Structure formats: structure tokens, C-alpha cells
Image (cartoon, rainbow, N blue to C red):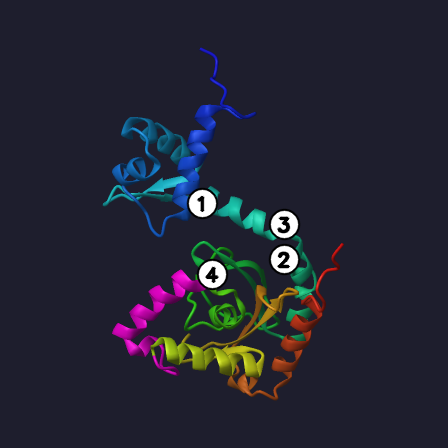
Amino acid sequence: MAETEGPGPGLKSLDAALGVLAHMARADAAQSLSDIARDCGMPRSKVHRYLASFVAAGLAKQEGRSGRYDLGKEAIHLGLSALARHDFVNHAAEDLPDLAALSGMTVLLSVWGNDGATVVRWERGASPAVTSMGLGTTLPLLNSATGRGFLAWAPEGAIGRIRDQELRRATRNPLLLPDATPSRAGLRSLVAKLRQRGYASVDGDFIPGLVALAAPVLDWQNEAQAVITLIGVDPAVLDPDSEAVKILRDYCARKSVQTAPATT
């Protein structure tokens, strides 16, 4: 039987399947078949067929013990490819090898994704930092240098959900935020300090054996479109007058948009 067309140029069954996939991308965590069917307003049997196809294609995965469904590796690759082709990201990333060579440190470029600060480019320095991070890694907002770059310069609407989730965890466990009061007022104070310095940093208390510096690549509204992070092992780079801080800030200033676009 021929595929039924929808009211637009697409196919109804494909539109419905993509709607399920889009719902999974917006969800905060893996979901059961029943939850996905309910949220999408579809029969369980229909959603199950879509999910089976997604799993076969690598766009979704089913967790063994719970049976819940989440996005798969191919969905991650798809999202990273889309982000990596964004003009702003390409502009910020085109000289990352030079930045790694000049600083001698590992360089990350991250953008804000559905789950937070997401690494989309990676350039190893002369002395590569030993870390489990890689492309697609999502970094915490409140206690990573990269996350703090978004905390201080990303728009409120983008980071609000993740910020509130992490703040609740830090309220229960203050050790997660040792250099700030785990409250809204404490975060406002932290943001003010970061903006005044123009960059974020974390020491070995956050990532054992590693130190990190991060600064935003800003658009014409002075909001972070990306964050560049330097990772190394020498605590001396954390000094505000260090060469690494100067190199990072100069790089991000060059990659940021300096003026508003012309209006017609």
C-alpha cells in the first residue's frame, strides 16, 4: 500500500516518527515506552515500531535493566555534526590548532546543547592532558570552567533548567560548589566575579590533577555562542597574569562579534 501523504510535502508516518525522536531529544532523561507513547499521544504499538527502527539505526538505545529508551550514538553524531557546521562554531574553531600550539594546552570548544555544555571540537596540546573527556561530553554548569563560561555569559532562558537542577544538588551537597554559596544569591555573586575577570577557571579540587581556563566567544548581544577551554596540569596558569590567560582572552576576543549587525 502506498505511503499516505500528510498535509504538507512530507509523509505522515515519517513525520510522526520524527516527532517521537524530537520528543526524546527534548526529554531530560531516558523514558519508558509507556511514557513516550503518552507524551506523544500515540498508541504504544505504533511508538514501539518507531523505537525498534530507531534502535536498529543507532538513533536510539534501550537500557537493559530498566528497558527505558534514550538517544543512541548516531543521534549524538547527528547533533554534533549539525552543531559543528554552524558558521559561528566554524569561525571559533578554525584556529584551534594554533591556540593549542601557542598555549601548549589541550583546547576544547563547547556549545550549549539540550543537556548542557557540550564539547564539539577538541585539539590536543603539546603535553596532552589525561582525561576521559571527548567529543560529545557534557560538562557540569556550576563546577567546570566550561560550564561557568556559559553560567556567566549564556542567556538565562537557555541555562535556567540545568542551573536550577545543579543548584538543588549543590544545596544538598555543598562540596559540589566549594567556592560559592549554593544559593541564587551565591550564584549571582559568582557570575559577577566571572564577568569582572572575563574568564572562568577551576583547579585540581574540581578535576583531580587538572586545571582549566575558559572564556566565552560572544555574539553581538554579548551572549556566549561558544566557550573555549584550555586544560593542563600546571597550576601556574591559573594566575590572572599568566600567559595562558592572556592567550585565551585574546583568542576569544578575536573570535567574538564586536558590533551589532546592520539593520535595514
The Cα–Cα distance between marks 4 and 2, rounded to whole angstroms, is: 20 Å
Q: Identify residue for label 1.
A: 73
Residue 132: image x %, image y %?
44, 63
Residue at image location 32% in from the left, 34% down from the top: 41
Note whether 121 is above or below 233 in the view shown.
above
The Cα–Cα distance between marks 2 and 3, rounded to whole angstroms, is: 7 Å
Note whether 49 is above or below 167 in the view shown.
above
Which numbered disc flags the more N-terminal residue, 4 or 1? 1
Element assignment for label 4: helix
Seen from the viewer's position, the closer of residues 78 and 191 is 191
Give the label on residue 89, or none: 2
Seen from the viewer's position, the closer of residues 165 and 41 is 41
Nearest to the eye among marks 4 and 2: give it.
Answer: 4
Seen from the viewer's position, the closer of residues 94 and 250 is 250
Nearest to the eye among marks 4 and 1: give it.
Answer: 4
The quarter of the rendered structure image containing the C terminus is bottom right
Labels 2 and 3 touching (C-beta < 8 A): yes
Give the label on residue 85, or none: 3
Amino acid of disc 4: Gly
Residue at image location 63% in from the left, 57% down from the top: 89
Residue 7: image x %, image y %?
51, 24
Which numbered disc flags the more N-terminal residue, 4 or 3? 3
Which numbered disc flags the more N-terminal residue, 1 or 3? 1
Note whether 263 is above or below 258 in the view shown.
above
Q: Identify residue for label 4.
A: 157
How many numbered discs?
4
Nearest to the eye among marks 1 and 3: give it.
Answer: 3
Task: Give the residues in magenta.
Answer: 157-181
Which numbered disc flags the more N-terminal residue, 4 or 2? 2
